[in-house]
Image (cartoon, rainbow, N blue to C red):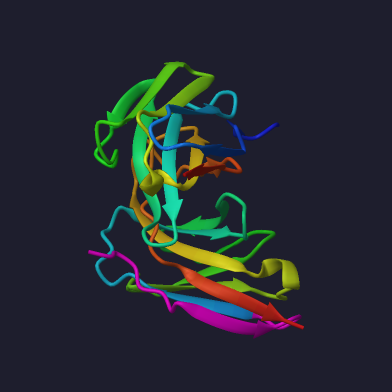
């Protein structure tokens, strides 16, 4: 019973924006949307999270729809080093935050 | 900050042997997680500790697996006896649980091969 749906793979040209979609139509009111990425042979790395407002940090922007049923992670200027598997996760607002990872989207940034 | 430190980074062992994986969480973090990653099953949460107490071990595959956290700065995941199907990358992660949206930091993983 996957809580999120992501495309299995995407390509993006180097220097262009990468827009990674995520569907979470059954999200609860107290659940946050998290994005992590995993570069080959490394541990997953936190990117960004949000509840209902759009968020931006030095790595990416997160756009959450008003009904919170979907979101988009935006890497504004993708580089070859952004090639990774990107995971969209929804998790409740409580201590511990046991994250359940789905299949993610394998983003390939091409020169 | 040194981040989450795992050892060994790579281990090859024979079926039936005991395997012990070690983790040092980030100082000050009070939650610790063990994950396993395989091609077939992806990233699976095995066990979660909060303040050194196991809170949820429903992901531990079977009795051959055990995990301990004797203090806030050290945890072990033990497999005894090991089997070829245990071959995977085992990640340890930690976070500071505030009751909010906590960021989880992962180690680099322990790559286990059981032959």
Residue B60 position by quadrant: top left
- From the viewer's perspective, is A73 left or right of A25? right
Residue A25 drawn at (x, y percent): 28, 72
Q: Position of residue B105 (x, y in %)?
A: 55, 42
Residue A52 at x, y percent in the picture: 41, 63
Relative to the observer, which residue lies in front, A73 or B25?
A: B25
| In magenta stretch: residue A9 | yes
- Report if residue A99 is visible in the image: no
Task: Locate residue A46, reporting x and y percent.
Answer: 56, 52
The quarter holding residue A77 reads bottom right
Residue at image location 30% in from the left, 31% down from the top: B64
User: Which residue is nearer to you in this view: B36 or A39?
Assistant: B36
Residue at image x 25%, y 31%? B63
The magenta-colored residue range is A1-17
Side (left or right) of A96 relative to A48: left
Work out which quarter of the rendered image holds the C terminus of chain A and state it: bottom right
């Amino acid at each position: 019973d996957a809580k999120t749906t992501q495309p299995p793979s995407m390509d993006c040209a180097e220097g262009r924006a990468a827009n990674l979609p995520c569907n979470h139509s059954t999200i609860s009111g107290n659940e946050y949307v998290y994005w992590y990425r995993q570069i080959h042979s490394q541990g997953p790395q936190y990117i960004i999270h949000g509840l209902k407002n759009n968020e931006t940090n030095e790595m990416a922007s997160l756009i959450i729809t008003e009904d919170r049923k979907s979101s988009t992670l935006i890497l504004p200027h993708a580089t070859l080093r952004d090639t990774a598997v990107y995971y969209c996760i929804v998790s409740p607002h409580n201590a511990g935050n046991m994250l359940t990872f789905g299949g993610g989207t394998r983003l390939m940034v091409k020169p | 900050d040194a981040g989450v430190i795992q050892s060994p980074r790579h281990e090859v062992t024979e079926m039936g042997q005991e395997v012990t994986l070690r983790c040092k969480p980030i100082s000050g973090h009070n939650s610790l997680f063990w994950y396993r990653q395989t091609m077939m099953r992806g990233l699976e949460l095995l066990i979660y500790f909060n303040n050194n107490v196991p809170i949820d071990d429903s992901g531990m595959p079977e009795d051959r697996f055990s995990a301990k956290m004797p203090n806030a700065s050290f945890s072990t995941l033990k497999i005894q006896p090991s089997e070829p199907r245990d071959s995977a990358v085992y990640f340890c992660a930690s976070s500071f649980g505030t009751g909010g949206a906590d960021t989880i930091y992962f180690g680099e993983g322990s790559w286990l091969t059981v032959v």
